[in-house]
Amino acid sequence: MRAYSRRTPAQALGRDFHGVRGLFTCSPALLTPEAFNAFLPAYLLRALDDLPEHCAVVEFTVYSLCPNQPEENGQDERRDYEDGVNRLLQNARLMSPPQIQAIRGFLSFVQENAGNAEWLRPFIIDALKKVWR
């Protein structure tokens, strides 16, 4: 019989797949809304494991929770931004209030503690105002 383990799912995956690269290289933004909601907790936990570093998992996870920032004031960029907000709101409608609160907590923590927080902060502030309220 296997002994009870207090490891997080991300730690267990890390042990089981030690040395395997690319386990979390797919952006959660590429998932359907239902799959996004199912796999998001694993991404949040994995991102917290790598928070002090400049890690693709942290960036992919944050970007999947934030609308793209329009680089210019052009109509196409604005439309892309609004589409991103609407996509995130669709995902949010499938979540419970505690799930949304967990996302708010994750984003707030990342904007203060990530190794590249200064880069992520504008995206996070916008997402907290427009989507995860």
Image (cartoon, helix red, strand yellow):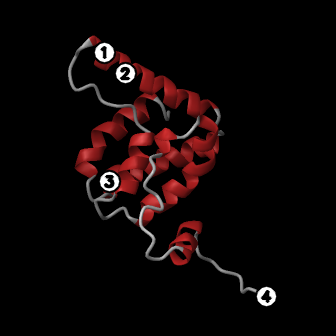
> Looking at numbered disc 1 in the image, what kind of residue is underneath it?
Asp
Q: Residue furthest right?
A: 1
Contact? badges 1 and 2 (CB < 8 Å)? yes
Q: CA distance from mark 2 to mark 4?
A: 53 Å
Contact? badges 2 and 3 (CB < 8 Å)? no
> Looking at numbered disc 2 in the image, what kind of residue is underneath it?
Asp
Q: Residue furthest top?
A: 75
Residue 1: mark? 4
> Looking at numbered disc 4 in the image, what kind of residue is underneath it?
Met
Q: CA distance from mark 2 to mark 3?
A: 27 Å
At 39% across and 31% down in the image, what residue appears? 67
Q: Decide which of tag 2 and tag 4 comes sooner along the chain.
A: 4
Where in the figure is residue 18, as x and y percent of width and height? Answer: 47, 77
Contact? badges 3 and 1 (CB < 8 Å)? no
Residue that mark 2 sits on? 80
Crowd class of label 1 (few under 14; some 14 to 19; many from 20; radius 10 Å)? few
Contact? badges 4 and 3 (CB < 8 Å)? no
Residue that mark 1 sits on? 76
Q: How many tags in the picture?
A: 4
Q: Is residue 72 above or below residue 43?
A: above
Residue that mark 3 sits on? 112
